Amino acid sequence: MERIERLGRRVTRSVEEFGYGASLLGESLYWLILGPFRHQPVRVPAIFAQMMETGIQAIPIVTVLAATIGVMLALQGIHTLKIFGAESRVTVGIALSITREFSPLITGILVAGRSGSALAARLGTMNINQEIDALRVMGINPVRFLVVPALVGMIIIVPALTFWSVLVGLFAAGVYVSIDLGISLSAYTDRVIEVLDPGDLGHGIAKSFIFAALITLVGVVNGAGVRGGAEGVGRATTQSVVQAIAAIVITDMLFVFVVTR
Amino acid sequence: MTTSMRLRSGNPVIEVDKLVTHYGTRRILNEVSLSVYEGEVMVIMGGSGSGKSTLLRHLLALERGTSGTIKLLGKDVSSVSAMEAYELRKKMGVAFQGGALFSSLSVGENIKLPLREHTNLDESTMRIMARLKLEVVDLAGFEDLMPAELSGGMIKRAALARAVVMDPKLLFCDEPSAGLDPVVASALDELILRLRKAFGMTIVVVTHELESAFKIADRITVLDRGEILTVGTVEEVRTSDNARVQNLLNRKTEDVLVDVDEYLERLTGEGDSERLSG
């Protein structure tokens, strides 16, 4: 009986958090569009700060991971296609899987672990230090002041990082393919351009927009709900990473299902 | 005419009428009614769990009660529009218990934040105004430091400077001297009185520190278990014939002594050594 009650509580809390996330998105759009008319615009420097933190500072690790994934796909692809004697067709698989799937997914997961968790920790700490209450009593809407810059910053920078990740992944795979199969890098590039159409890139980038919003909202919902001091902040941070990654993977699957069927 | 009577003849800037609030099924505030008059220092005093912090959160419109009304500067906070609430908040300043300075902003930027958000002042004017307020709290020259670089007392003083930077009509202070050594705590009490004198604002202080309350209050509201036991001047509270008030005023000292005794016993480990020797 107790287990059922606990499960029920958990489900209720999840539905509540989902609803809160949706209302945060709505409120963020409200402040983004109507804030300037109410003389309460969104802080542009804060958007740039978020973009710096999420994007620019993440470039080295995104580059390393994208290159590794590119080489890994080339290795696996050549190994598998060798069975059919079709290893020269590896470029098709690499180009499509990196552009449509791996780059948005890996970038999303990385940003969730790096910036989504930082956002949850920052808001959680602000919450327990009464900084969010301080904003409210100063007449500063916390959603406008804290959430909108993070959301806008993420929505701009995550797709940009994804695009960078696509370029790096394709290049790294190309270097390996050219060495292993003895084809020139320019021939590989021509083949990639021939295989990909703008829709493939659009598919990956569109997903990254959704991932960016998910990472931000999951981070904010967890951070805003922190109770119980430093331990609570730690719990919210971990929860934020787990939930954001789960949301990214599930949304990815749903997106692919809807778009490709 | 006593101070209490003189103050009561002014305009009430805060009016709480039969405020009731619950957390779950537990009643936290039970028909609390209170008036704070223009220019006075009202101290809300009570022990842990008395409901004083909850009352403060309601006065700041951070929470809504189950029933009853709160009027701040003549406006019923439960029925004001978002725009009216926004205008109302510009007339209020709050110094939170831990300071609540934004850790990512320097002290100067913290003080300037309300000005930046609510006014069209240029950067140099804002800098001058922030410096003036920092001078009032004896923190001039500390603008460029980050909150993490300040001591506990300095954080509270910086929080006070931020709270008064917009020259509010109402200033709320949550446990201003809690966690500070007696010298710093006393200096902070004097600062609150200085702020009242300098800016003529109405000040509401929530505290459990008796000494501090008696030093700064024009009137004191004593809360216990969600109920107001008495409201009066320092002298009226001191000489109150309400047994619960007297209990509260005296109990604190006893509690501290018991805690110290228990602590010392644990520290010296008397119990353990007896068992070992046996």
Image (spheres, grey):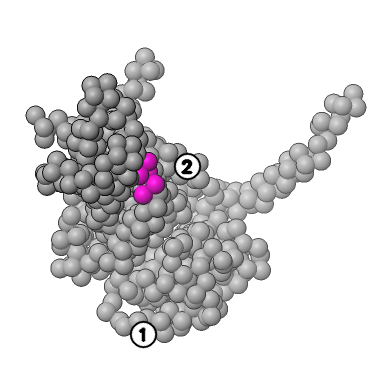
The image quarter containing residue B169 is bottom left
B103, B249: nearer the viewer: B103
The answer to whether residue B47 is above or below residue B183 is: above
Check disc 2 and give the amino acid type: Gly
Q: Give me the residue at 36% from left, 49% from top.
A: A63
Residue under numbered circle 2:
A234
Q: Is residue A167 a member of the stretch shown in magenta?
A: no
Considering the numbered disc 1 on the image, is that residue within a helix, a strand or a loop? helix
Which numbered circle lies on residue B125?
Answer: 1
The residue closer to the viewer here, A192 or B137, is A192
Q: Is residue B149 left or right of residue B87?
A: right
Q: What's the magenta region?
A: A63-68
Nearest to the observer: residue A81 or residue A49: A81
Q: Position of residue A183 (x, y in %)?
A: 26, 41
Q: Residue at x 21, y 40 (%)?
A: A95
Q: Quadrant of residue B191?
A: bottom right
Indicate left or right for B147 with A83 as reference: right
